[in-house]
Amino acid sequence: MRYVDLHNHTTASDGLLTPAQLVKWGAQKGLVAIGVTDHDTTDGIQGAIEAGRGFGVEIVPGIELSTQIGDNEIHMLGYYIDIHSIEFQEEIEELKEDRYSRSIKMIDKLRQIYKISISLEEVMEKSGNKAIARPHIGRVLVDKGIVKDLNQAFEIYIGNDCPAYVPRKNINPKQGIEIIKKAGGVPVLAHPGLIKNQSLIEDIIHCGIKGIEVYHSKHTSRQSAYLKTIADKNCLIVTGGSDCHGDLIDGKPIIGDIKVGYSVVEKLKNAASNN
């Protein structure tokens, strides 16, 4: 079997690995293809493609968009998008600008509510002076010894129900799907097992997704089996990925820990060509 991991992040968004480092690890884990799906940006894709040539790893160009229904955060993956589409880049630039402004507001809240000494410059440094996001804020809190790890930063300070949280620009799943489709991409519902209100999955399917991320590092085997049933019933592409952000566990990132067969890449390509 030839395996692929279709959900990974780089330093272009909130990952810790550069595109080249991510590809290198993917090759070491024996993957023949990896998806580069940074949050609200495609800036890491070209570097990954160049590295992929050297390591013999195919790159599936992608993106991860954050959408919202009420208090339910719903992430949408888009595969085989046209990263050179001017309209597409303008739309995601607006989302990146929103990430920046909300990060500033969260930093201010941390200072005002908790009297935590944290600056925009420190967070920007964590992001490599690229698009900033909540994990960058969380990593500063870890470095300062305020929390023990990123999970605790989200649980106490910057998670969705925490006092320092600031909501992002609200686009709904249908809008996210349309952004992906207009760029020639294939919309796939990301880690649906993490959605608070599971009944929303059926509604999202009717919005026009082409696939479901059945296999994910935070899905239980029972969740994956349930989601596989839903995908099969609705004739949707079954995808999977580790959602690697570059954190090391026993000296290695989790890229490749969740994987699917290369046939999934072929299905995504076919779906994109039929757009």
Image (cartoon, rainbow, N blue to C red):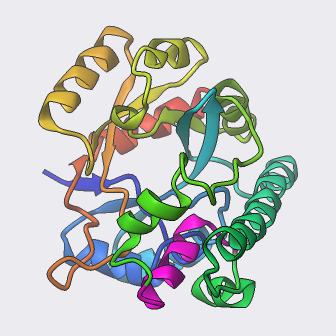
From the viewer's side, name the closer residue of 162 and 267: 162
From the viewer's side, name the closer residue of 38 and 156: 156
Is residue 206 located in the magenta-colored stretch of the structure? no
Left or right: 144 in relation to 128? left
Q: Tell me the residue at 38%/39% (across/down).
A: 191
Q: Main secondary structure of the magenta part?
A: helix
Q: Tell me the residue at 54%/19% (across/down).
A: 204
Residue 197 percent across, percent down from the top left: 44, 22
Q: Tell me the residue at 65%/90% (across/down).
A: 122
For the C terminus, give its image quadrant: top right
On the image, which quarter does residue 115 sit in?
bottom right
Position of 49 relative to 94 (above/below): below
Position of 57 relative to 262 (above/below): below
Which region is colored magenta?
A: 131-145
Q: Is residue 194 visible to the viewer in this orientation of the structure?
A: yes
Residue 219 percent across, percent down from the top left: 24, 41
Residue 194 percent across, percent down from the top left: 37, 37
Position of 16 relative to 160 (above/below): below
Residue 86 percent across, percent down from the top left: 86, 54
Left or right: 38 in relation to 202? right
